[in-house]
Image: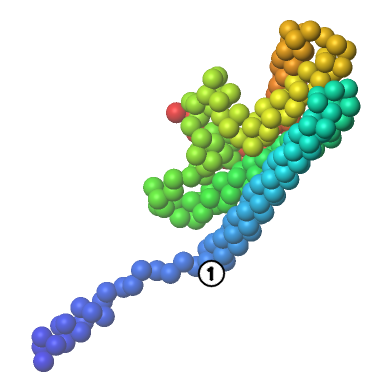
Amino acid sequence: MKDTRCHSDNVSSEVPPAAPGPGVATALQILATEHWSLLATRSLTFTESLSRVSMFLAILSGAVIALALVAQADQFGPTFILVAILTLSVVLFAGIATIGRLMSLNRDDFRWVIAMNRLRHGYLELHPELERNFMTSQYDDLPGALQTLGIDVTAARGLGSVLHVIQTLPGMLSVIVAAVVGAIGALVASAFAAPSLGVVLAAAAAFVLAVVLLGIWGRWSFGRDDPSLAPRFPTPKS
């Protein structure tokens, strides 16, 4: 009987871990709900980006097929040049509109990443002991956003930055659109009976000019200040 009582006393003396208070539980629920809402919004952003790119590539493919048929009928004569300039101008408009929309979607996605970093900071304010379990960042400045996106901060400078830009959807489409501009430049030079070297130089100049202008546009697009994106929880300086 004595051993049984002692064992019973030991069991009853064990205190279970304290459950989080109602305020903490409510805060976690609110943060988690907002986090899932942002994830769903990011998913819609990705879906629209891919659909926009597919739409532009379909327009470009259709234009190339149509021009091939016209070239067979006209043997690359004046009619083909006129039709090609008009058709590629429509493709150019679709490309510029697509790039503009992709830049807007990328800005939105950056906003959602910043918002999720702020929520993650809220999680860690409630449970700081979980910080070692997080691979993404809890800071809402540029380095924190790049960490969440999986982009190396040191590689996001210089040549690494340029290589990363042309791998993105707006960067890739900018190169394709610049090639369309180069083709239009070559067609215009051909319409004025320019020699072969003049046609090549016109195409190259138009391509380079388009790349530069689209690059400036992209840099200006992401360089605009937005008060809502001002860091509230910046990355600590090492």
Residue 183 image offset from top left, x and y in percent: 76, 23
Is residue 211 among the parts visible in the rendering? yes
Residue type of the residue flagged with mark 1:
Pro
Question: Which residue appears at 16% of the width and 82% of the height?
Answer: 7
Which residue is labeled 1 in the image?
22
Q: Which of the 4 image quadrants contains residue 143?
A: top right
Whether residue 86 sits left or right of residue 4 in the image: it is right
Q: Which of the 4 image quadrants contains residue 169?
A: top right
Determine whether 81 is above or below 134 in the image: above
Residue 213 image offset from top left, x and y in percent: 75, 21
Callout 1 crowding tier (Cα within 10 Å): few <14, some 14–19, many ≥20 = few
Looking at the rendering, in which quadrant would you find the C terminus?
top left
Looking at the rendering, in which quadrant would you find the N terminus?
bottom left
Q: The residue tagged with tag 1: helix, strand or loop?
A: helix
Is residue 96 among the parts visible in the rendering? no
Residue that sits furthest to the bottom in the current view: 1
Determine whether 87 is above or below 33 in the image: above
Question: Which residue appears at 56% of the width and 29% of the height?
Answer: 164
Residue 179 image offset from top left, x and y in percent: 71, 25
